[in-house]
Image (cartoon, rainbow, N blue to C red):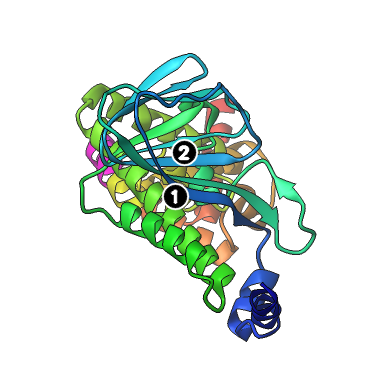
Amino acid sequence: MEDKKNRSQYDKEKLPSTWKAFLSQQNFLPVVVKSLERVHDSTWSMSPNRHGHFEMLYVKKGSAVFVIEGDNVHLSPNDIIIIKPCKRHKFIVNTDEKCDFLVLSFLFEDARSRNISDVSMADFIEFVNDDKAGAYTHLSLPRKNDIISVLERILRERESGLMWEDLMTNLLLMELFVLISRTLKNEWELSVKNRSAKVKELMEIAKEYIDANYNREIVLSDIAKYVFLSESYFAHMFKQEFNITPKSYILQVRVEKSKELLACTDMKISDIALSVGFSSQQRYNDIFRKYTDCTPFVYRRMQKEKRLNLEN
């Protein structure tokens, strides 16, 4: 026991400098509360409970039912379920055969203050911690899958007692969350592909987002994330729906808004450029000429002449 304690202290003192630098730049990082492997049959039972951490359960063999906030979730081999904190749940083995499963409980801790966060890393909570997703997330995976492989490696690492065990566990946890986020996003996109009406709705939502935020420094990734799609798939579907790329549409909206200001106000052209989202007047002049075949100055003069002719 004393040797293990000394080794743990040695590990903390001898952490690689790159890992220390990484920790110093992060806010909340994953921390394993517990990890275990269990085999139970239908004679086993548990009382409903809730706790303040995430719980991930992977079924290796057999089948079971997870009762979560009144929902019955049927689990088969290679199913994973992630239960959010403070959700009432109960695990039931519903067949005579034994159920072999892995459990990983985790939360997120400030790397410097050690304060506990009730949310996770951005890429992870994009789906799992979204209220619309409910109390849990359920994934059915193929037998050979990177998520399952990493999950099993975490358990093995936790039991190994090897040097830098905590470091390796944290790295594996972050890899696990990236893989889960990708899987969730892929499942979302597959479901969208099978629902053309949903695609149209999402593209309209994205268009409204651009219309409301054109004057900010928005990029493709911002809009794609807003509608829970990958950048490439979103860009393809937006072009297909509106016959214009998202980037071109942003620029088009900015130019149209600036035309209103040129025609109806006495604002300086440089101020108009900044107010509609362009980084500089030169950039604004180039884009404006591309979309209108004239400069902002010439456009303002033509609009002024039109008003004078109408008044006379």
Examine the image and state in which quarter residue 4 appears.
bottom right
User: Residue 257: where, in percent of width, then height?
Assistant: 53, 40
User: Residue 153: where, in percent of width, then height?
Assistant: 39, 62
Q: Magenta stretch: give its range.
A: 236-244
Given residues 280 and 243, the one toward you in this image is 243
User: Residue 55: where, in percent of width, then height?
Assistant: 52, 40
- Kind of residue at badge 2: Phe
User: Residue 297: where, in percent of width, then height?
Assistant: 55, 55
- Kind of residue at badge 1: Leu
Q: Dot 1: what SS? A: helix
Q: Is residue 3 visible?
A: yes
- Residue 51: give its label: none
Name which residue lies at 26% across and 34% down. 62
Q: Residues within 10 Å of mark 2 (few under 14, many from 20)?
A: some
Seen in the picture, residue 263 relative to 106 is either above or below; the reply is above
Q: Quadrant of the C terminus?
A: top right
C-alpha distance separating marks 1 and 2 = 30 Å
Given residues 46 and 210, the one toward you in this image is 46
The residue to which callout 2 is attached is: 127
Given residues 269 and 49, the one toward you in this image is 49
Q: Are marks 1 and 2 in contact (CB under 8 Å)?
A: no
Number of numbered discs on residues = 2
Name which residue lies at 45% across and 60% down. 154
